[in-house]
Amino acid sequence: MKNAVIEKTNFGRGLYSPKVAAHIAQIKYQNFQAWSKANLLHPVFEIPKGKRHENIYTYYDLLLLRLIKRLRDKQFKTKTIKKALDTIYLMSGKDPYAWTRATIVVDSDIIVAILPDKPDWNPIAASKGEQKMEVVFFPELMEELKRELIPNRFQYVEIDPNILGGIPVIKGTRIPTNIIHEMIEEDINPADAYPDLTSEEINDANEYEEYLVAV
């Protein structure tokens, strides 16, 4: 049932282990574990790993991780973020992806979400007289979160859930950026293995991988 929902939302084709998801989203693994334990994330299934099982996450969770980090950076507590996301979930009829359609407004101590398909739901907590709220997420939020996964300066890198399970690749190819980085680390010239790549693409892929570890 979960997989059917994910396919419908176009988020399900990128699948990530916890460490890979944390790495790509530039989240410390300890934070990822804490947010997962707080039920802020939505694993789609488990796979065997030795004597235990490991949760698998989607591209949706990469974006959600960036949103949670953004709110945590504004000093919101994890329980406050969970309450906001849980409210969106319930008001949407238990759609785990409803936050991607919501207008999310934050102030110094309030997170408010307004769903476009729930016009009658107008939370009074959003009202502060003439005072403007500090930050309004949306309609640009989704694109902003995607850019946080790959900043604009990396023009030759992309993450597409439909390509190689959503791992970062050189744009227009199926060549993972981590392969390029590993080759350079081992003093192997990537151009020998991939002669069609330009030096700009190779440098971009390598610099992106270095960026990912600079949390």
Image (spheres, rainbow, N blue to C red):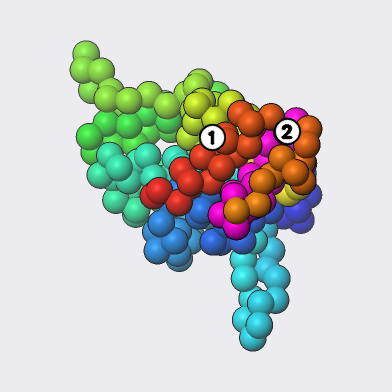
The three-letter code of the residue at mark 1 reads Ile
Q: Along the line of sight, which residue is nearer the eye, 170 or 22? A: 170
Would you say 2 lies left or right of 107 here?
right
Real-space Cα distance between discs 2 and 1?
Answer: 20 Å
| Vertical relation: 105 (above or below) 80 | above
Which residue is at a point 64% across and 31% down the rendered structure image? 199
| Vertical relation: 102 (above or below) 36 | above
**Image coordinates for residue 88, horizontal then vertical, percent:** 50, 40
Tag 2's secondary structure? loop
Q: Which residues are magenta?
A: 169-186
**Image coordinates for residue 168, horizontal then vertical, percent:** 64, 43
Q: Along the line of sight, which residue is nearer the eye, 204 or 187? A: 187
Which residue is at a point 68% across and 36% down the rendered structure image? 170
Tag 1's secondary structure? loop
Can I make out residue 190 in this image?
yes
Q: Quadrant of residue 29?
A: bottom left
Which residue is at a point 68% across and 68% down the rendered structure image? 46
| Vertical relation: 46 (above or below) 155 | below
Q: Which residue is mark 2?
A: 197
Can I make out residue 14 in this image?
no
Q: Quadrant of residue 127?
A: top left
Check if residue 141 falls in the magenta segment. Answer: no
Check if residue 178 falls in the magenta segment. Answer: yes
Determine which of the numbered discs, if any, sits on residue 150 in the image.
1
Q: Along the line of sight, which residue is nearer the eye, 205 or 9? A: 205
* Residue farthest top in this picture: 130
Instruction: First in sequence, mark 2 or 1: give its number.
Output: 1
Q: How many marks?
A: 2
